[in-house]
Image: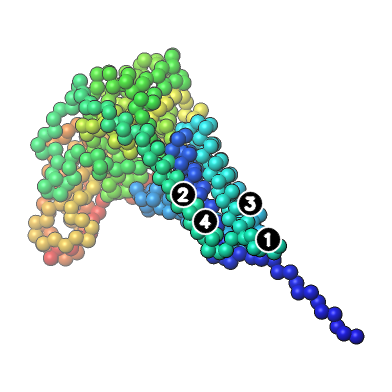
Amino acid sequence: MSALKEAPPTVRPRLSLGLATAISLVALVTALGVGHLVAGFVGYSASPFVAVADFVIAHSPHPVVVWAEQTLGTADKTVLKIGIAVVLLGFAVLAGQVSRARPLPGQVLVVVVGAFGIFAVYERTDVGQLALLAPVLALAASLLVFSWLHRRALPAETELRQGFSRRQVLQRGAGIAAGAGVAAVVGELVSSSGSAAGSRASVGPLVAARKAPPLPADADFQKLGSPPFITPNANFYRIDTAFVVPQVRAEDWQLKIHGMVDREVSFSYADIRNRPLVERVVTLTCVSNEVGGDLISTANFIGVDLVDLLSAAGVRPGAQQMYATSVDGFTCGTPSSVALDPARGAMLAIGMNGEPLPVEHGFPARIVIPGLYGYVSATKWVTDLEFTTWDARQAYWLQRGWAEQAPIKTESRIDVPRTSASVPAGRVRVAGTAWAQHVGIAKVEVRVDQGPWQQATLSAEVNKDTWRMWWAEVPVPVGSHTVSVRATDQSGYTQTDHPADPVPDGATGWHKVPFTAG
């Protein structure tokens, strides 16, 4: 009896790992391109990539936020972009790996990632419901491309001759990816055509009815190593939660004041521009500034007195905070007593250093309140002011453990010599900056190693809301040394040598710089 031959088992076709991954990457690029294209028409912030990034910023655990600010500084947004890109690439590779035999697992992953993009856009407060078109169409396009390429690359046995070759699949995938890139560029161009830059360019010169006094000749010691007194706009520090700079046209901007007020009022940009403008020189400081850090800058701001706008609304007794909201949803709580104090000099600023506010610094308008750290006083792209109580509302940074009251602490910094610098022994020049906004600097002292304190020469005081430069010459023998600095403000307080982290209300400690004399 002859043995019966067994029929060979049916081998289910599978994509190679490289081809499956390529299909997933094309689907990812398609989603990003289509989303960016549609966002160009319905609002730049509706781009799924942008929305997801802002979602991550808004919902990151507090320790992560603090670490990012202190470690990465102004590079945190760039690192976030790279991180999200890596995660998306990871999902694309995973979708390819699990879909080599059939498309369903990859399709599920595409839907999950796309749904997250839809949710991120839905949660935004700076776009309308039409903005959901961007992530929805991005998901639909991605799913369609993924399914179509997969179906062509993995035919059933009976349809083998109708399938595409590997080269044909790759060619069509490359064409789709190129089209997605073009779509993204078109979306960028469409968005830019209606951006804030064009609106800002049409504002024209801003002339203050009440000008700031001219700066004295010795307002800084730049030739001796201090920074310039006025920080150029391009060098002004920028710390905010916006992943993409909000694009608000002056023609579309409006400020609403409401809450615990006698009457709700609104102001357009033209309303503000046509008021008598005031000019003030103010130093702004970020609460994240480490001892010796550079998150501090000074500018000549032009705008209107905030108290005049608030008087039009009639703030009621019992209102504890001015809860400011930016166009991108960022919130900031300022003590009402400070915002309403005419002596404080709080402004709604529309100009900075002789030109309209730069877009990245808040165009069309921002809040500027001297003497408070920026997270409670300097809302950019501001569009809403609500007067309320501390219990009723918690602003962005208060929810993350930062202090409710945030007066800027008296601090000082050494600008020269630099850390680990080598200088000639003998008389060594030390120069730097000190600040105690809204109080004023009275004295700065330096010492080498554990030697006696020596009083430094101060620059002319411009006003109590700005920094003050200083310099001194100290005798230094050959060897390794450390120079320290401390400031005393005009209330008589001398800054503490006790080191404290920026959280929750600003860093403290003496700035110390090691150097070598030879």
Foreground tag (3 vs 4): 4
Q: Which of pointers 2 and 1 lies earlier in the amino acid sequence? A: 1
Please report the residue visible at 64 percent of the width from the left and 60 percent of the height from the top.
162
Q: Quadrant of the N terminus?
A: bottom right
Q: Which residue is mark 1?
A: 159
Mark 2 or mark 3, which is nearer to you?
A: 2
* Residue type marked 2: Gly
Dot 2 or dot 3: first in sequence order is 3
Identified by mark 3, the residue type is: Val
* Percent x, y of residue 166: 56, 64
Distance between the alpha carbons at the discs numbered 3 and 1: 25 Å
On the picture, is 14 further left or further right than 7? left
In percent of width and height, residue 412 lies at 24, 45
Q: Quadrant of the C terminus?
A: bottom left
Q: Residues within 10 Å of mark 4 (few under 14, many from 20)?
A: some
Which mark, by number, is residue 179? 2
Judging by the rendered image, the residue that carries numbered circle 3 is: 108
Q: Nearer the viewer, residue 487 or 347?
A: 347
Q: Quadrant of residue 282?
A: top left
